[in-house]
Amino acid sequence: MKIMKFGGSSVADASRIKSVADIVLSKAENEETGPVVVVSAMKGVTDILLSAAAAAESGDNLYKKLILDLKQKHHQAVKALVSDNSIGVTLLIKIDAILDELAEILHGVELVKECSPRTGDLISGFGERLSSLLTSAHINNRGVPCEAVDAREIIRTDDAHGRAAVDFKTSGELIRKRIVTGSGNTPIYIVTGFIASTSQGVATTLGRNGSDYTASILGAALDADSVEIWTDVDGILTADPRIVPEAWVIDEISFQEAMELSFFGAEVIHPFTLRPVIEKNLPVFIKNTMNPSAPGTRIARNAAPKDRPITGIASVDDVSMITIEGGGMVGMPGIASRIFASVARTGANIIMITQASSEHSVCLVCRREEALIAAEGLEKDLSDTLHSGIIRSIRLNDGLEIVAVIGENMQGQPGLSGKLFSALGDTGVNILAIAQGSTELNISFVIKGDDKNTAITAIHRAFLSQRPRG
Ligand code: ASP
Ligand code: MG
């Protein structure tokens, strides 16, 4: 049995949803059971919901118009997707009830002039509830038994709203109880991506783009054969094609490499997605809804070895670097732990760390807004060391970019970083900091944001210009 996840662009409108149903039904014909399908909200809907919440919070009537827009969008899709009168009427009643509920919640937000993270999670998950009903009704309309499942019933999380942590044990039990596959006449299940709930039944979300993660949670719980992430590109590319037009699709990639690429901003897959499937050793395929016959990218433990040192290049935009500098830190145990504890207290996520062996300086790289808060926290928490001169300064540099070069074949390859940095040097790109993990899977470096395109193009030319045959 397969898990098939379709992202927002794959269910963007009625004609896209028809293509999704074509793909799902052709799989259903060829296999004994399943598939289990996960859908995102129709493209743009989650953003509209968040805008509506923000408008309501600030007392702006715009939210009412946004609800009407959503109603029109979904009604239009029903008209195009459902010809059977009784299926259509039932569906419209359900859609309208959901949108009425949304209107009431938003009205509440308007009255109290506050949208807490908890309420934000409740509101942002409405899109998936609508798209799953729409997709399942369309498949029913084509004469195939199909059932929409609200993932709040089956995925349990803590209450960290905005990016809740999954309770895998309880979720696994709930998923296996609700989604029964294996016998020939089970329906096709269309599960909402992105949303979940706490043990108290409070709605949560798995973070933006979290539907990929929903798919892998289901895959692991149901012991699926594979998880397919259907999107609008042919697979994971060697680099962002907006920067490197000659970038090409990687046919096979290891779990570790794919995790590194997604962590460093490759947008095809949510960074958490691979955690549940790695343990179960389930392969993940990235496929294109607009081009279903393309082979896509296979992510698996036993990915075929490559004959090139680098697998792909990713980058993170708009980061800032905090540099903590001072001769007094040399050989002083405990200073690093104070630095990291202070950053952790602010909730900022550190993407990259470097420390010169002299211990004269420690650099931390975070997204811009988080770096700002982290730097403020450090000034406060380390004020004693600033006064005593142990630390001379805490500096913040904005407008930077992290570029990460990723590949398992970099392990034990002497001369590789030489080639990498001379390719960059030849184009005049200045490097502000470098980090390499001891697994040698990833070399990341910080440059000025303006140098991003030059740097990525130069590395691609140096290492990835030879597209493999086959
Ligand atoms: N609809 C959610 C979002 O836009 C989740 C997803 O698409 O995966 O973030
Ligand atoms: Mg996505």
Image (tube, helix red, strand yellow):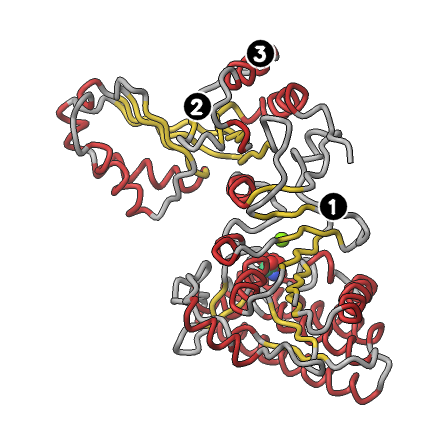
Q: Residues within 10 Å of mark 1 (few under 14, many from 20)?
A: many
Q: What is the quadrant of the C terminus in the image? A: top right
Mark 3 and mark 2: Cα distance apart in space: 16 Å
* Residue at 64% over, 77% down: 182
Q: Quadrant of residue 125?
A: bottom right
Furthest-bottom residue in this view:
86
Disc 1: which residue: 234
Query: Is residue 44 among the parts visible in the rendering?
Result: yes
Q: Is residue 364 above or below residue 105?
A: above
3 or 2: tag closer to the N-terminus: 3
Report the front residue among 321 and 414: 414
Mark 2 and mark 1: Cα distance apart in space: 31 Å
Residue type, mark 1 in image? Asp
Report the front residue among 20 and 349: 20
Q: What is the quadrant of the N terminus in the image? A: bottom right
Disc 3: which residue: 428
Question: Measured from the top left, where is residue 132 in percent x and y?
Answer: 67, 72
Disc 1 is placed on an element classified as loop
Q: Is residue 438 above or below residue 282?
A: above
Residue type, mark 3 in image? Gly
Question: Measured from the top left, where is residue 142 in percent x and y?
Answer: 83, 78
Q: Residues within 10 Å of mark 3 (few under 14, many from 20)?
A: few
Give the numbered dot on residue 434.
Answer: 2
Tag 3 and tag 2, C-beta contact below 8 Å: no
